[in-house]
Every structure is written in structure tokens, then in C-alpha cells.
Image (cartoon, helix red, strand yellow):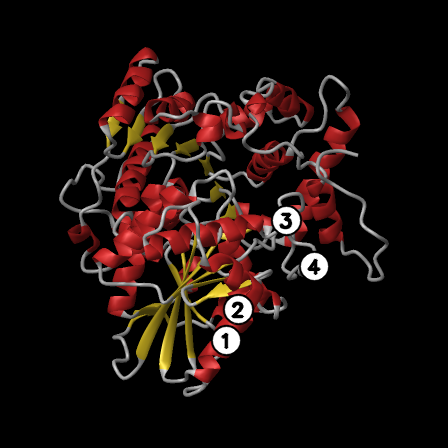
């Protein structure tokens, strides 16, 4: 039995073909933790054997690829890049990670998730050949490597004009780096994340990201800290790579419109996307007629692409569809998958400004999630002023992976919000529902009665220490009494106090929020969901139900 896959007890209901594929995919997830340094490189060259097995070594060399690495903003940059080129009339293929609700989100054709029928056809085509041809020396690829190979198969078979690849982790040894001759490369903002794998200094992290540079292939980056920029420039010089800094997008170039992706930091990503698209069009011979040499203006297709792009889980505002009447209550989720210290700060700034301006997406979440086959152009955004008659309460719903340091993340979030006059009335800590060793479908998994909440209790202790100015790990005289109080009603919460609670499951936390809204109908509850893209996906899945 491979990886973290375990045999499930016999199911009473029939397993759908799609669930069968997800079970197979889950079997490729390894038990090894991401913090295991032995996976550095991890026989990178074996990827080229897989390409030969799938007869993709020829097709991949002909793909017109835009390859993007980075710590923050690489997914947003790829999304903006795809939207621009799609609006220029090109048949696009976009590969991103992670997915929030459904694995098919990782594979987008012309801005839309690949349909189930095509996904299954390409999935089993790759699976069967790899199963048949793998052996002890060349075992089945691991989870992310299989997904990257599947992306290459999809984009090759669908004959897309352009492939936009988001690096999964790092760059040098990432599965997407089997591409030997991209058209152009991009490096988004660099910061401290995945240090257990990529290194402890910004320079080491930059070196890993620069691993996607190829000899003589142009590359762009955004303004970086000196330590990171010097490493990028050194790596570029060694490979004769013309490396340029893309300036942040000037808002005036959008002719009075707004970027489709919210947050000030998106103008950095948009500037990088514009530079990548300009260069791709020039290098592939589609430059003529686009007026790309105009510095003071953007082509209409670029403006449309930038202003209609959408990306779930990044600066996304979702009113809870549970309250759809006029007077039943008001619960709004502000979702952002920030999980590094720098992105926490950006997330806090976006949340603070968003609740001040009262920006809300008008389209119902149900419609958005149930009809995922539609393009992002159907997502209508409308700015509306805050209803001043309603008081508001800000709640934090948080989780992060245990390899991350909450003493780096939470202070940045608290301080940046406080700087804008925003203070959380309560923080809720929950475990993720989506399991790391299983690929889920749209269904909400059952709460595990034996769930280990030790990490969530650690997060709560850090939060309480920050809120009350205590040292983490010091004597907290209130802890025992609070814990005892929580024991009396374990189904609702395990450990609760005035400023925070730990819930054994996300559905229970959402039930608590909805109950609170019912009891306080004159109050607007504004819930910031952050710390983990997995958590953001779980929330979207829960409120959809």
C-alpha cells in the first residue's frame, strides 16, 4: 500500500467514477511530512522518465510556457496573466495549486475548470500508462508530480496556445521545472515560507526560486529586498538571463476601472503579469496590432483581462447564503489564504479597508459555487456603502500548518489590523476538515470524534498571550479553569474564554457564528478566515452546504 492511503471500510453507497479517481490519486500522497529535508531534489531526473512513459517529452518542448515562482502572489500573477491572454483571443491552459474545493480547479482551460468528463479521460490515460510501466527503479510518481504530468497531458491534448504554470513549491526541484525552454519566467514577491525545505535565509529561498531560470530566457520579477534581489541577479547573470524588474501597475492605466483581484498588493502582481504577457506576445510573434510599445496606455484586451480576473480564496468576500432574508441576520466571510508573515500583513490591510468601505460581492455564493463551469466574467462585483445603522463585530477564524510559527503570523495580523483601528472581538481556532492524506470531493467530510486539537490549543495560547500581553509558555492561571469550563460542553467547544475559542470542527464553529447572528440581529458579523488555503476551501465548502 503506498503513501498515506488506507483501505476504507466497505461503502454502502456506490462509488462514482470521479470518487474512484480521487481514491486512486489519494494513494499517491506520501506519509512523509513536508518538513522532511530528505525530499530535497528527491530524484528530480525521474520526472523525465515519466514524460517519456507518457510520450510527453516531445509535446512539452513545443509548449509556449509562462513559468512563475515566488513566495507570495504567484497564483494571483498566473491568474491575471491567463485572463489577459484569454482576452487577447488565445486558447489558454492554467495550472495552479492548491485547490480549494475540487482538484479540477488546478487545471483551467480558457479560464474554466476542466470538466469532469475530460478530467477522468486524461486521468486514467496517464494513470494506466504509469501503472503499467512503473517498476522498483521508477515507482509511481508522488501526488504533486502526477498532477503536474496530468496538466502537461491535458494541455498537450487540448492544443492550447499558451501554458501558464504556477510552481508548486520552491522552483529548482519543482515538478513544473521539467519545462526546459519556457518563453518567459516570472518571480513574484519573495518572503519567509516553507523554510523547513527551502532554507532559512531570504537569499537561500531566492536561490531555490531562481532555479526556474533557463539559459538566455527572459525573466521578470517585482521589487524585492536587497538580499533576495542580489541572489536573483547573480543567478540570472550566471545563465545569461535578461532579468528585469516589472514596476507595479499604475492604477490610472485601467481607465477608471478596478483590478478584478482586490488588495493593494495585487498591483505588484498585475505589473508582473503585464510584463510577462508583453514579452510572451513579442517572443511568439503576436506583437503586431497590440500597441504594446505604448508605455502610457494598455491595450483594451489587457484592461479587460486585469479587471475581470477572479481567484477564489484570495481577498474574497462571501455573504453567508444561510441568511438571505432582509432581517434574519448579517454574516459575511472575508477569505484570504495568507500564510506567511508578510502576506498576513497584506491580508490585515485588505480586511481593514474592505470592512471600512463595505465592499461586498453581490452575486450569491450558491450560484457561484454550483455553476463552476462559467467563466470569471460572470462574477459581478458591486461596491456598496456600509449600512451605518448596524453595529459590526470582527471575528477571526484561523488555522495554520504546524510547520508555521504562529508567533510570527498572529502579531503581524493583530498589529496591522490595529493600525487601521480594527480589533477582533473573538478568535476561533479550528482544525482543517480536508485531510492531508486524501483528496476530497465537494462533500463535507464527517467530523473526526478523535481529532487532535493540541495544535489549535497552542494557537489559542499564543493568541491569548498576545491579546493580554503575556509571554507564551508562561504561567497562565486561567488556563485550567477555562479548560474545565469547556469540558462541560465539549460538543460546542473544547476551550473557551471571552476573547477566543477552540472548536473540534469547522461546522461547529460556523454553527456558533450563525447562532450568534440569530441572537444579535442588529449586529453585522465580519469574519476574517485566514492562515491556510485549506481552511479557506473548507469554509467555502461548508457555507455552500
The residue beneath circle 1 is 514
Q: Residue furthest left?
A: 296
| Sooner in the amino-acid sequence: mark 4 or mark 1 | 4
User: Where 378 sits versus 57, above or below?
Assistant: below
| Sooner in the amino-acid sequence: mark 3 or mark 4 | 3
Instruction: Count every numbered label the image shows and give the total.
Output: 4
The residue beneath circle 4 is 449
Of the residues tagged 4 and 1, which is closer to the observer?
Answer: 4
Q: Position of residue 515 (x, y in %)?
A: 51, 78
Q: Residue furthest top?
A: 238
Q: Is residue 151 left or right of residue 445?
A: left
| Sooner in the amino-acid sequence: mark 2 or mark 4 | 4
CA–CA distance in space, label 3 to label 2: 19 Å
Residue 370 visible? no
User: Where 523 sits versus 339, above or below?
Assistant: below
User: Where 398 sits versus 318, above or below?
Assistant: above
CA–CA distance in space, label 3 to label 4: 14 Å
What residue is shown at x 26% (from left), y 41% (from top)?
Answer: 271
Q: Is residue 86 left or right of residue 505?
A: left
Q: Are marks 3 and 2 in contact (CB under 8 Å)?
A: no
Q: Are marks 2 and 4 in contact (CB under 8 Å)?
A: no
The residue beneath circle 3 is 435
Q: Are marks 4 and 1 in contact (CB under 8 Å)?
A: no
| Sooner in the amino-acid sequence: mark 3 or mark 2 | 3
Q: Position of residue 164 (x, y in %)?
A: 44, 38
Label 2: state its secondary structure: helix
Amino acid at each position: 500500500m503506498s503513501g498515506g492511503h488506507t483501505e476504507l471500510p466497505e461503502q454502502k453507497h456506490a462509488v462514482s467514477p470521479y470518487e474512484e479517481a480521487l481514491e486512486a490519486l489519494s494513494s499517491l500522497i506520501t506519509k512523509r511530512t513536508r518538513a522532511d529535508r530528505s525530499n530535497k531534489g528527491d530524484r528530480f531526473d525521474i520526472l523525465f522518465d515519466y514524460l517519456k512513459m507518457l510520450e510527453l517529452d516531445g509535446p512539452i518542448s513545443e509548449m509556449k510556457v509562462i513559468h512563475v515562482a515566488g513566495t507570495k502572489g504567484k497564483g494571483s500573477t498566473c491568474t491575471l496573466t491567463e485572463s489577459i491572454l484569454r482576452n487577447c483571443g488565445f486558447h489558454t491552459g492554467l495550472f495552479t495549486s492548491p485547490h480549494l474545493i475540487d482538484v479540477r480547479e488546478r487545471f483551467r482551460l480558457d479560464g474554466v475548470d476542466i470538466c469532469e468528463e475530460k478530467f477522468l479521460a486524461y486521468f486514467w490515460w496517464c494513470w494506466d500508462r504509469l501503472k503499467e510501466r512503473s517498476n522498483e527503479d521508477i515507482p509511481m510518481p508522488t501526488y504533486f508530480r502526477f498532477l503536474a504530468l496530468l496538466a502537461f497531458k491535458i494541455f498537450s491534448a487540448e492544443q492550447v496556445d499558451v501554458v501558464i504554470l504556477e510552481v508548486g513549491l520552491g522552483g529548482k526541484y519543482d515538478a513544473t521545472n521539467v519545462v526546459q525552454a519556457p518563453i518567459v519566467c516570472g518571480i513574484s514577491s519573495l518572503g519567509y515560507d516553507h523554510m523547513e525545505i527551502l532554507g532559512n535565509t531570504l537569499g537561500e529561498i531566492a536561490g531555490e526560486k531562481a532555479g526556474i531560470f533557463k539559459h538566455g530566457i527572459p525573466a521578470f520579477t517585482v521589487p524585492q529586498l536587497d538580499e533576495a534581489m542580489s541572489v536573483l541577479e547573480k543567478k540570472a547573470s550566471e545563465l545569461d538571463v535578461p532579468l528585469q524588474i516589472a514596476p507595479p501597475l499604475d492604477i490610472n492605466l485601467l481607465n477608471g476601472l478596478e483590478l478584478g483581484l482586490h488588495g493593494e498588493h495585487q498591483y505588484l502582481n498585475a505589473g508582473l503579469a503585464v510584463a510577462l504577457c508583453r514579452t510572451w506576445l513579442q517572443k511568439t510573434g503576436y506583437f503586431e496590432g497590440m500597441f504594446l510599445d505604448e508605455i502610457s496606455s494598455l491595450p483594451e484586451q489587457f484592461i479587460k483581462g486585469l479587471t475581470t480576473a477572479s481567484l477564489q480564496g484570495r481577498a474574497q468576500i462571501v455573504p453567508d447564503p444561510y441568511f438571505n432574508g432582509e432581517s434574519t441576520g448579517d454574516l459575511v466571510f472575508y477569505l484570504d489564504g495568507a500564510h506567511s508573515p508578510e502576506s498576513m500583513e497584506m491580508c490585515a490591510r485588505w480586511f481593514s479597508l474592505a470592512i471600512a468601505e463595505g465592499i461586498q460581492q453581490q452575486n450569491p455564493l450558491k450560484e457561484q459555487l454550483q455553476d463552476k463551469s462559467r467563466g470569471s466574467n460572470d462574477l459581478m462585483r458591486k461596491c456598496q456603502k456600509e449600512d451605518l445603522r448596524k453595529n459590526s463585530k470582527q471575528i477571526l477564524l484561523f488555522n495554520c500548518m504546524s510547520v508555521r510559527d504562529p508567533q510570527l503570523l498572529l502579531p503581524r495580523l493583530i498589529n496591522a489590523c490595529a493600525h487601521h483601528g480594527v480589533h477582533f472581538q473573538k478568535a476561533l481556532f479550528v482544525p482543517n476538515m480536508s485531510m492531508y492524506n486524501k483528496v476530497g470531493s465537494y462533500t463535507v467530510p464527517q467530523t473526526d470524534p478523535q481529532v487532535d486539537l493540541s495544535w489549535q490549543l497552542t494557537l489559542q495560547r499564543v493568541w491569548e498571550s498576545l491579546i493580554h500581553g503575556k509571554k507564551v509558555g508562561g504561567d497562565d492561571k486561567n488556563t485550567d479553569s477555562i479548560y474545565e469550563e469547556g469540558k462541560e460542553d465539549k460538543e460546542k467547544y473544547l476551550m473557551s474564554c471571552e476573547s477566543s475559542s477552540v472548536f473540534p470542527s469547522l461546522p461547529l464553529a460556523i454553527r456558533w457564528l450563525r447562532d450568534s447572528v440569530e441572537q444579535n440581529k442588529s449586529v453585522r458579523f465580519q469574519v476574517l478566515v485566514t492562515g491556510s488555503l485549506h481552511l479557506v476551501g473548507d469554509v467555502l465548502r461548508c457555507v455552500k452546504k
